[in-house]
Amino acid sequence: MGSLFRSEDMCLAQLFLQAGSAYDCISELGETGLVEFRDLNPSVNCFQRKFVNEIKRCEEMERILGFLLREIKKADLPLPDRDVNPVAPLPKHIMEQLQRLEAELSEVTRNKEKLQKNLRELTEYTHMLHVTKNFAQRGSEQDPPQAQYEEFPFLERDAALDYTGMQRMGAKLGFISGLIQRPKIEAFERMMWRVCKGYTILSYSEIDEYLEDPDTGEPTKSVVFLISYWGELIGQKVKKICDCYHCHLYPYPSSREERTDVVEGLGTRIQDLNTVLLRTDDYLRQVLKKASESVYTWYIEVKKMKAIYYVLNLCSLDVTNKCLISEVWCPVGDLGAVRQALEEGSRKSGATLPSFVNRIPSNDTPPTLIKTNKFTSGFQNIVDAYGVGTYREVNPAPFTIITFPFLFAVMFGDLGHGLIMAVFAFWMVLYENNRKLKNTRNEIWNTFFEGRYIILLMGLFSIYTGLIYNDCFSKSLNLFGSGWSVKAMGSDIAANRFLILDPNITGVFKGPYPLGIDPIWNLANNRLTFLNSYKMKMSVILGIVHMSFGVVLSVYNHLHFRKKSNLYLVFLPELLFMWCLFGYLVFMVVYKWLAFSAAESKTAPSILIHFINMFLMQSSGNQLLYPGQIGVQGFLLVIALLSVPVLLLGKPLYLYWLHNGSQRLGMYRQVRTQEIILKGLNAPSSNWPGCVCLRLWALSLAHAQLSEVLWRMVMHLGLRVDTSLGVLFLVPVFGLFAVLTVSILLVMEGLSAFLHALRLHWVEFQNKFYSGNGIKFSPFSFALLASSFDHDGFP
């Protein structure tokens, strides 16, 4: 509790690392995670530091590991467990191994791609031959060759040019065949007609099977085409058009015998290629499987090596270039562990001279370190979101563990909703070590999972306040029997059909309910009036107590930092102002509860009117709460008014006097007071307009009313159906009610209450004693490297 109440006591230390053991010493310090290194070479460019080449080699190894990871994922191989923590090896031990593995995998992958390309081309060639065979069969069933070319339009326009005439002109008939993607065939046909002016015949047919696209690797539909053309010039144009549309061209057999031989040869080659590819895949899979067993270990080792060399670049060399000097921030209580880590590093490296650490004095403000665990880290994050605590000031986190979920529950109080929230959080706590739950890429889920203990306490406190409010899904639970009897009001209820509870009627009120609010109030027509008064006064009392506690905690800061003047110029005026006004309001509420009975409630004085008259310094002639009330109120008001100028002017005038009021202070005192003035201007301020926490009252009433509206508009309709189909109708109604309850009342209303509780702690509580102007301690720790693996592709 001591370390959680304040940040750890820090010191600045100097490390003297022998050149031969510096790497191992830094590695041991990274395993412990106890020190934060300072940069002793701020003026040196990153590319001009001593170990920049080693960092480049580590980045090259990261590139190789990224290649391995992509290949392993492509092969659909499982990655190993992450329960390993290897030490950082020397770069030469792992660099050669990774380079050999990359070269082997690259060669096998290139060969596999070439084989797959050949197999794809042979498969396409086979399909082309089978389809064009049908073209040839249809052509042989037609008339002699002269009739095949009657489709050319120019032959109809010019009868002098016929097939024989084309032969006399020296034109030769040629064929081009290949494959084209299905979406391109229409544009391809249109372009062929426009460019070649009818000197071609295009025949095509779609392949029934899907073929792999060489560019994307996805299965696509392809079309086999056969182009007949006249002359070499037309043939060149046809080939250029085919190139523009990325057609795959294959030689067209000139005879049936040649076609048969080619088809048989293709079948044999395809079979051989499939066999070779199968063996290549097996070999590649074996290599990748062996690599996958060590890829996570290699990744950790490379990350550690890179981090070590990065830290070594922060160190400076002594004049002999045989010793590295570094400065670190370290908790005072962990200096022994740091010395032990340096000794272990020197022993592993076999150095003859040991490395050692010396504590050095410093006027710099140390970083803030607050040690947490999995339970307290979520609440500490709430505090740090406001600002990292100033070094050694009071930490609000241990008090937030209780006050935050409690104030949330005051606004969210419902037994049923709290139970659902607690069960959900308990499930996350129960499976908190499940890797699939911890390492997801969903930021919203990660936020919920990191705050599982906060949600658990919010749910448990909501169950408690739900019992106090006697509210469970907007309905009350009659656990102990009501303390009211409405038999005496039977005639009034029958006549007016309204239930207005009045304890002054004889025989109606028999005694208080043992726990929380009596369930009879859920049926009363004056329920909202009763709950409104109850929750408003409760909220005022809780808010004043909460903020008074924050003001009291500021005393510990004033005494710790030896600012006794703040006790008289800040703390005392704050406390007097708040308790002379709002503390007196709490006194009147409690006094009225105790001094006036239910029979005197109608004639009891109004607290609001008396509180307003206190500021106006007048009496309205109404009944007083107690004898001497006017004098007491006037005295308290005078004290509160006198506290205002002290709050506004006391500390600034005192700081001004320290800076300019006495010549005997000297130059040192003047420089020191300048620092004091800057700290005084950044001191926590008071936020009195938000002193009365009526948001607790408003949010609590809003949540209860919204829950009641949801019940009446959804669930109540399903329960009113009394036919035989009522049960079937109730199933979808209950489903709708459950969805709306979770989405609106739990998620939206829960988020609203969470944000208001956050505001109450930041502004109304922490602002009284917590400045949050510190710098967070960032240790050199290998444990922090694991978070980067999720972004690098590890599941």
Image: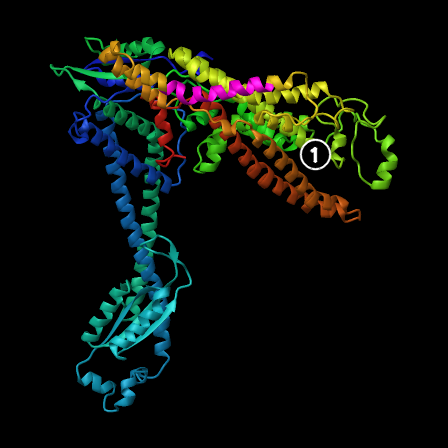
Mark 1 residue crowding within 10 angstroms, few (<14) / some (14–19) / many (20+): few
The amino acid marked with disc number 1 is Thr
Question: Which residue occupies 20% across, 25% down?
Answer: 42
Question: Which residue occupies 26% across, 34% down?
Answer: 101
From the viewer's perspective, is 26 left or right of 680? left
- The image quarter in which residue 55 lies: top left
Residue positioned most to the bottom: 159
In this rendering, does residue 291 appear at all? yes
From the viewer's perspective, is 627 left or right of 450? right
Which part of the image, by quadrant, shows the C terminus?
top left
- The image quarter in which residue 605 lies: top right
User: Would residue 452 be counted in the magenta stretch?
Assistant: no
- The image quarter in which residue 392 lies: top left
In this rendering, does residue 433 appear at all? no
Q: How is the image coloured?
A: rainbow
Q: Position of residue 99 (x, y in %)?
A: 23, 33
Residue 259 higher or lower than 466, as above or below: below
Identify which residue, 663 or 509, lies in the foreground.
663
Question: Which residue occupies 61% across, 27% down?
Answer: 613
Residue positioned most to the left: 320
Identify which residue, 584 or 285, lies in the foreground.
584
Identify which residue, 483 or 438, lies in the foreground.
483
User: Would residue 639 be counted in the magenta stretch?
Assistant: yes
Residue 528 higher or lower than 429, as above or below: below
Q: Position of residue 536 (x, y in %)?
A: 63, 29
Badge 1 marks a residue whose secondary structure is helix
Q: Position of residue 18 (x, y in %)?
A: 19, 13
From the viewer's perspective, is 715 left or right of 357? right
From the viewer's perspective, is 635 left or right of 660? right
Q: Which residues are magenta?
A: 633-652
Q: Which residue is mark 1?
A: 529
